[in-house]
Structure formats: structure tokens, C-alpha cells
Amino acid sequence: MAGILEFAPAIVLLPFLSFLIALGAGRYMPKGGALAGIGATAGSFALSVATFFAVSGGQNYNQTIYTWAEGLDAVNLTFGLLIDPLSAMMLVIVTLVAFLVHVFSLGYMNDEGETGLPRYYAGLGLFTASMLGFVVADNLLMAFMFFELVGLCSYLLIGFHFRQDGPPSAAKKAFLVTRFGDYFFLIGVVAVFATFGSAAFAGPDAFPVLAEEALHGEHSVNTFLGMGEQAWFTVVGLLVLGGVVGKSAQFPLHTWLPDAMEGPTPVSALIHAATMVAAGVYLVARMYGFYVLTPTTLAIIALIGGFTALFAATMGVVKKEIKQVLAYSTISQYGYMMLGLGAGGYVAATFHLMTHAFFKALLFLGAGSVIIAMHHNEDMWDMGGLKDKMPVTYYAFLSGSLALAGIVPFAGFWSKDEVLYETLIHGLGGSPILLAAYAMGLLAVFFTGFYTFRMVFLTFHGEPRSGTARDPHGVRWNVKGPLAVLGVLAATAGLVNMVPVEKLFGIKGIDFLHQFLDGSFSSLNAHHYAELMPYSSGYIGGETGTVAIGAAVSLGLALAGAGLAHRLYNVPEPVEHTDKLGGIKTTLYNNYYQDEYQVWIATGIVQPISRALDKFDQGIVDGVVNGLSSVSLFAGGRIKRLQTGVVSNYAALLTLGLTALIIGLGLIGGWFA
Amino acid sequence: MVPPQYYLVLSAAIFCIGIFGLLTRRNALLFLMSVELMLNAANINLVAFSYYWGNVTGQTFGLFVLALAAAEVAVGIGIILTLYRNFDDVDVMNATTMRW
């Protein structure tokens, strides 16, 4: 296994190859290029698993592959690979989900007779390759480039059905909103280069390490705007965070994600489970050594996360379409990850990133299966009673839902509980902001339980409420297979990190993820982050007591939410109970008028400013330039009359000139003095 | 020995006749002749000063200028021929197409 990490670039290149094949030859191939994509992602998955085991065995890999701009006395811009436990774990997640999504697409796209399949598979391949490139990036600039590629691919895939009205508009919105965040990220990248002269994540000149030394006064860095080091690092951290908030759909840049549901359902699974949305959270985890140095940034991350978790969960309660519910649950779950990172729970957040990737990919693919069965009707009020007609989908979906709601022992319980536990103990250690974020996260658990099971009961239980639900379209192995794989993972993935069990029963050594993430470079492991953390811990009734109380409260709330949904919606003929909320429902259904206020900002503020600037540009800047050119044109038109074309005139001018020259020289020389 | 002032006056007079012809005539052939007059006025100066200083370099120069003038006439006649072919005339006032 010694040399397996040397093959790591192939993990990225294989899906890129499938992109080229699908783009160039997809139309001549059976299945529109799907087989190339399936083969490539399967190969990447196999290599990732091998990489994962090599990394588990203690190997890490940090290598610059190519220097594409070399600076004399300045920064080098490079491409390189950084394989450590974090990226190895992410590689496995991304390649597995991408592989399953490719297989699922056979059922969702090919069997449904969609056109434009080569374009679709080319997009999937490029999307996967970009995300993998982002995951293995060893410096911030390379990460930024692949971050942008991921955004581009999401634009191409969300707008796949470009002949309809909705998808192109949703694709543009996703691109613009995430781009808005990326703008800050770009400034952040430049700031990192200007401050540290390097943007490497690991190695001798890694910028988190330089920042740490600068704060201890062992190393000097350039700060700007007259700020001290601490304040300037906070600014840089917040700039990079702009990109994270955009990509990971955190408040207030979350509005693109629900609209992105216009894309084909397998694409939604890929975007929300493994690739685009995960990229933001992964970036924070990747440069966690930098964020952990600035308490202000951590507190802001925690607050944004906690607020987004609650905010999105409340909107999920009233939605009609199955994919909309899942969209808001995605925003909410990424809120938890941000909360975990902000609260100092690096491992907890990474853990939630992993479990969420599995159960959310499962839920989206399950929803895709339901949508195939319902002839592309996504309204849950037209479904019902699908449990008996499609048992594989039902049980897989149920497994994912239990994981999402956080019911023991499914994956989501362990990770969400650990996120909340870390927030609680660090909040009790003297940080009221974290306690506030904890309260929001805890409240969101109840809503999560409610909307998840409202969705399950409306879709699968009760009596069929429409003709298509009575006689659904069957699905084949290529849909059921991925669902089964992910269903098992959603049920069991949490077992890799059973911290509450360890703490409550004193069984040592079952926090495998903690141990695994500690195996990284000394500046990148979880242990190092814990030393740098600005928080102290506090407990209610000792560590064991706090674990028990935290787990009991969050499980109790999740069960309460699920129980309420069971009571209200698990009946043969459910009615829309949320109608009783009246005006609140209208507000929730309209997403707190987030879209409206953002449109108002665009048309009410930005547009008039742009108009004024356009007037200034057209009138004054262009006016000056045009004025200069018309003056010289006019002058030229007059002066060219000198050129008569008559040779005698030229001779006369020559003679006059000579005479004038002689007289002039004479005057200077003193002839007439 | 004739003093050099006389040669200079003669040369200046011939040069002025040349300029006068250049400025007043419209016939291209007369133009060419006027130019030759001006060239030879300069030649007279060369020869006169050479004679005055007792040095033959100037006279040799004069011979070379004569050869050059012959070549120049060949070119000039060629131009005039083309002028005649294009405008059916050797009047320089007609050839005004090479302006703006």
C-alpha cells in the first residue's frame, strides 16, 4: 500500500475523463455516456477507499504537483495535493455519493426518456471532478478555483431543463447568489496572500501556523488598515466566510438553494449531500486552524449556524413539495455543522458532515424514486399510501428520515447530538453567545422531527389521494440499489463515533472518528485544534451528567416533533393542520419574504445606484473621451486643407520656409545687429 | 584673377532664376529645368571656392554633382512621362489627386 497515495491525482482525473468522454462521444455511446461516468466514479471510489485505508495506517501526503506562476521574491501559485484524514474521509463520501447518483440517474434520466443525456453526464462528471479537486486542494487559491468550478457546474446542472421557464432562472439565481459570497472569498484569498505570503493549508509555511506564530509574537506578518494581528485575522476570516455562507446556503445567502430544486433530482442529491453545499463547511474545517485563532469569527459562525438551523427548519414545516421540505432541511442541517464548527466541535461538525451526506443523499434519491412513481408530481398532498406499493423506497426513506430527525440509533442522532453537546459545554464554560446558539439549535430539533415525519406520513402513509398515487409507476434495480446502500449507511454510519456511549458507560476507544482525525499532520489534527480553542468547558452535574441530559433533551424534542407529526398526519385522510397558524403560515410559506426583500434590495437600491453610475459613465467619462476625439477630428478636418496636392504650393512653402529659416538664423547670429 | 564675390553673385542670380521658374511655371518640363539651374548654381559655388583656395577637391565634387544631375534628370523625365500618361498633360496644377 506504500505507493497508493501517489495515485491520488487519478481520483480527480477519472471523473474529468468521464466528462470529456461524455461530452465528446456521449451521443454515440449506449446510455448517453452514463457508463463512462459510472466506471470513472467507481474507479475513483475504489482509489479513495484505498487512500482512506492508507491514511488510517498513518500515511499523509502533501505534495506540490505543479507551479503555474513562480514569483521572484513573491508568492508562488501552485496546484498540489493534501491528503490527510479529513480529505480522505471527504473523498470517500464524495466518490461514493457520486457513484450512486450516477447509477440512480440510469433510472431517473435514461429510463424516463430524457433528452440531452450526454450533456447531463458530462455535467455530473465535471461536477464530481471539481468537488474532488476542491477536497484535495493544498492551498487556498486552488481551493478557490475549484470552488468556482463547482459553482459553474451547479449552474449547468440546475438549468439542465433549459427549455422550461423555472430551471434557467433558478440556475442563474444559484450562480449569482453564491457568486456574491465568493466575491468576498476572493478578496479573502488575496488578503491571505498579502498577509502571509503563502496560502498553503499544511507544511512549513502553512498560513494557519504562521498566524498562530504571529499571535505569539514569534513571526511577523503584514497587517493592513492599521489593525492589530488579532483584528486583521478576524477580518480575513470573515472575508473567506463570505464564500462559505454563499455555498453552504447559510442565512442570508440561503435563498438560492430551495430554487435549485428545479434541477433533476439526482443532481439535487449530489449538490446537497456531497458536493456544492458541503464545500463551504469543508472549507471551514480545512482551515480550522486559522478560524480557531479568532474567537469573534467562531462566535459569528456559531450564531449564523444556530440561527440558520432554526430559521430553515421552521420554513420546512409548511412546504407542499417533497423536495422543498428536503431543501429546507438541508439548509437547516448545514446550520448545525456551522454551529458545531463555531462552537469548537471540529470532530462533531465533520461527523455531521459525513452522516448528513449519507442520509440526505438517501432522502433525495428516495424522493427521486417517489417522483418517478408519481409521474413527476412533487406535491405531497397528491401522494399518500405509497408504503405498500414501493416497500424498498419506503424503508430506505424511513431510515434516512429517522437519521435526519435524530432518533437513536440512526446516524443523525450521534452527530447532531455531539454538535449540540459541544455547543452546550462550551456555552456553559462562559459563552452566552454559544448558549443562545444552542437554544436555537435545540429548538430546531423539534421542528426537524416534525417536518421530517410530516413528509414521511404524507408521502407514504394514509390513503392514496390521487390517481397516480393509487397506481404508481414502478422503479427498477438502478433506483433501488443506491437506496439500499445508503439506507444501510444512514442507519449505521453513526456507530463510528459513539461518544455518548463512551462517556456514559465508560467504554474506551469507540470514538473512531476522533482517533482517525487525530492522525493528521501535527498542525491539522483535532487535538491541536482543541489546544488552540478559545473556549473553556462547563458541565451540569459532571461530564457524564451533561452528556446524558443533552442527549435526553435532544432525543426527547425529536421524538416530540415526530410524535406530533404522527398524531396530526398519520391518519387515513390528513388535512393541512398548519392552516391553523394563519398569518404565520403565510409568512413561513413565503420564506419570511426573504426573496422579496432581496429582490427589493436589487431593484430598489442597487438598480437606482447602478442607473446613476451608468449616467455618470455614459455622460461624464464617455463625454470627456468623445469630446476630445471630436475636437481632434474637427481640427484635423480643417488643417488637412493645407494639403492642396498642387506641387507649386509645396514648392512655395518650401521656399518660404527656407527663407524664414535663413532670416531666423541670421537674427540669432547677429547679422542685423 | 576674378575675385570670388563675382562668382557668388552669379551663382545667387542663377539660383534665384531657378526659384522664380519653379514658383511661376506650370509646365513640368520647365520645373525640371529650373531645378537643374538651382543645382548648377550650387556647382558654381563649389568650383569658385575650389579655385580660390587652390584645391581641386571642390572641382571633383562638381563633376560628381553633374553625374548626379544627369541621373536625376533621367528620373525626372520618367516622372513627367507618367504624369503625361495619367493626365494627358504636363501641367502640374492638374495632378492634385494625391491629397486627402
Image (cartoon, grey):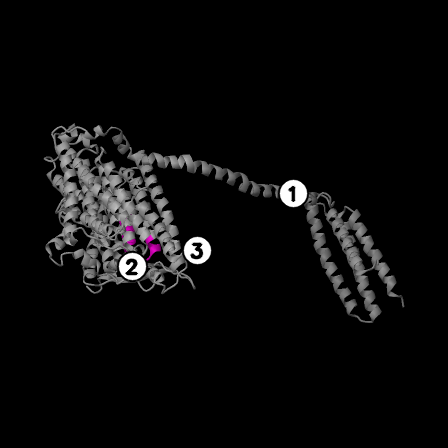
Q: Which residue is mark 2?
A: A81
Q: Nearer the viewer, residue A568 or A200?
A: A568
Q: CA distance from mark 1 to mark 3?
A: 52 Å
Earlier-in-chain disc, 1 versus 3: 3
The magenta span reads A126-143
Label pair 1/2, CB-CB below 8 angstroms: no
Dot label at residue A635: 1
Q: In this picture, is A617 found above or below A385?
A: below
Screen quadrant of the N terminus of chain B: bottom right
Residue drawn at (27%, 43%) of the image: A307
The reply to the same-chain question for discs 3 and 2 is yes
Is residue A138 located in the magenta-colored stretch of the structure? yes
**Secondary-structure class at tag 1:** helix
- Residue drawn 37% across the image and 35% down it: A599
Is residue B12 shown above or below A98? Answer: below
x, y percent for residue A502 = 13, 55
From the image, tell me which residue sits under label 3.
A226
In the depicted view, which residue is nearer to us: A65 or B89?
A65
Image x and y of residue A582, in percent: 24, 28
Report helix, strand or loop for mark 2: strand
> What's the amino acid at mark 3?
Gly
Which-is-in-front pick, marks 3 and 2? Answer: 3
Q: Where is residue A295 drawn, in percent x and y?
A: 31, 53
Q: Amino acid at mark 2?
A: Leu
